[in-house]
Amino acid sequence: MAILFFIIFICFTLGITYWAAKKTKTTSEFYAAGRSVTGFQNGLALAGDYMSAASFLGIAGMVALNGYDGMIYATGWLVGWPALMFLIAEPLRNLGKFTFADVVAFRLKQKPIRLAAAIGSILTVLAYTIAQMVGSGNLIKLMFNIPYETAEIIVGVVMLIYVLFGGMLATTWVQIIKAVLLLSGVTIMAIIAISKFGFNPGNLYAEVQKIYGTKMLEPGGLVTNPLDAFSLGLALMLGLLGLPHILMRFYTVPDAKEARKSVIYATSFIGYFYIIIPIVGFSAAVLLSKNGMTGQEIIKSIDKGGNMAALQLARELAGEPFMGFIAAVAFATILAVVAGLTLAAASTMAHDIYVNVIKHGHADETEQVKVARTATIIFGLIAIALGILFKGQNVAFMVGLAFAIAASGNFPALFLSILWKKFSTAGAVASIIVGAITATTLIILSPTVWVDVFHAKEKAGVLKEVSDLEAKVKPQIELLKNQINSVSQENKLSLEVQLKGIENSYNQQKQEIMAKMPKAIFPLKNPAVFSMAFAFIAGWLFSILVPDKEAQKRFEDEKLRTYLGIGAE
Amino acid sequence: MAKTTHEIVNSEKFKKLVTKRWTVSFFLTFLLFLFYYGYIGMIGYARDVLKIKIGEATNIGIILGVGVIIGSWFLTVIYVFWANSSYDRTVSELKKELK
């Protein structure tokens, strides 16, 4: 059934690609859909770009298994959108052409800026792509029982067809269709689910509480280190403002006013999505309970991470066909997101590097489109290869890495180039390079990579020792506690002393084992607070040290275009 | 009365527009930070408040979580209203002066 829905989706989107291909001849059509997309359409497409399979299946599963912590996580994904609106959206649309490097390079020296910005962009897009490809391979394997490698190749080839032939126009429509399918699929699921609770979320929470206790509805272990939470928040909020595949979408609309509309629609759709996803998650935890097993146990029996919770709920609510529909939507989601990323990477490689650096900006339309298509194929193949290469690897940190590089490498340079007259070429290059390098290095040294990836075995060993110890000691403690409750007063005392002794030695042993836990060199899970600060400082320092008088003169032209949109493409 | 780029950019009206644009933007960004980090801060330092029940099982934490999303969205709406009315009007006036 899922296969059938999936084939319908593929045929339909390929039809659109065929239609779009006829309209895609120039570079502006290939990269920016001829700037013909409306604010509403772009809002849906932005939402489509942002709502990945990981946020749909992943957050639903997280809420189902961890309860309230999943909700905290969900809120973090929305808050970037208002910031995007307030700080970047309109100037970006007015100043740029195809990539965000256009904005930074507006009054600075083309070559160094384009090269630096390309490094920032490609690193961001690569990290994001690896996360998406590996995630998609695993999901498709779980959903359709297709081997991992085949799944990677299917995703790679289908999205290549969209981008290669249909360019931005086809990619935009694939995003729009996917966003509509995803939003309606989740809505239908949430409505059926909540109808089982008399259309009252309060009743749903009450059921959750009945099965799992109040803990499920209260914050758990997510925000334990305040500095880490602050840093993650910064990366989520400002990283969005540096994601090349998101920024690129702003060039598909005709002007700044439509860009503004895009963000308000996107924010509305995404906000709505993150509000109803927890309902799906909590409902899965409650409604899947069966035969004395809790919903959580049933979810974990299929996938430990809970990624299948939404699909399991869909089957429970409306049978196999509905599950097939939701699975097809998840697959469509993966395809669309990877297509958007590929287009962003191709625009950087072809427009920033080939045309503006290698060809000094002199390349005719036919050549530019040809190069853009070549770059698309190259990146598509890289995506497939990376997907297969990282099979079975822990890539959970990759999305965090993408956001950290975007927030530290891309955002500060973009923001300073719009606002600060004295921002110079040296400043911009320093800011991008310092931001991207510190973000990457610190993530490698952080607990997420240093411990969870490089020292995964040691960590697992320590955790196993702890659980073994627990398994040995816990029954003894329970036994003693029961005895204490049942024996007479005088015997109680000696037993209590015995209990204290066991508990103390247990805690001591546990501490000794935990001391062997591998330690990260850099303590924070997300480095944005430092790497972004470094990027801003580097940008400021090098602008002062190596000023750019020419660029300062051109700031008036830039301002006219930034605020009034005069001369915008 | 056509003005040059230099005259427009250095006119009082343009300068005021730019200042106002960033005042509005930074103020709304500040509120956004306040909403989000206020919420995160409460999770870190005032957990017990979030655990207070206001229904059978619904607690303040759930309301605040949804509230952060709706509140952030609302800030975006405020920006759009301001930009559509005030900002766009000044922009079109300035554009006329340039031509």
Image: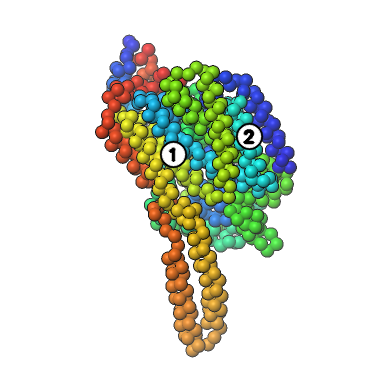
Residue B46 in view here? no
Q: Residue at x 54, y 58 (%)?
A: A216
Q: Residues within 10 Å of mark 1 (few under 14, many from 20)?
A: many
The colour scheme used here is: rainbow
* Mark 1 residue element: helix
Q: Quadrant of residue A177?
A: top right
Question: Which residue in the structure is indicated by mark 2?
Answer: A157
* Amino acid found under the numbered disc labelled 2: Val
x, y percent for residue A394: 53, 50
x, y percent for residue A44: 56, 33
Q: Residue at x 38, y 44 (%)?
A: A438
x, y percent for residue A79: 46, 42
Instruction: State the CA–CA distance, disc 2 to disc 1.
Output: 27 Å
Q: Residue at x 65, y 38 (%)?
A: A154
For residue A174, side relative to residue B76 (left or right)? right
Chain ID for label 1? Answer: A
Query: Eyeballing the image, is A513 above or below A282?
Result: below
Toward the viewer: A382 or A424? A382
Toward the viewer: A187 or A391? A391
Count the numbered circles shown: 2
Quadrant of the snapshot with the N terminus of chain A: top right
Q: Earlier in the sequence, mark 2 or mark 1?
A: 2
Toward the viewer: A567 or A264? A567
Q: Residue at x 57, y 60 (%)?
A: A209
* Amino acid found under the numbered disc labelled 1: Ala
Residue A211 in view here? yes
Q: Residues within 10 Å of mark 2 (few under 14, many from 20)?
A: some
x, y percent for residue A51: 55, 40
Question: Which residue in the structure is indicated by mark 1?
Answer: A406
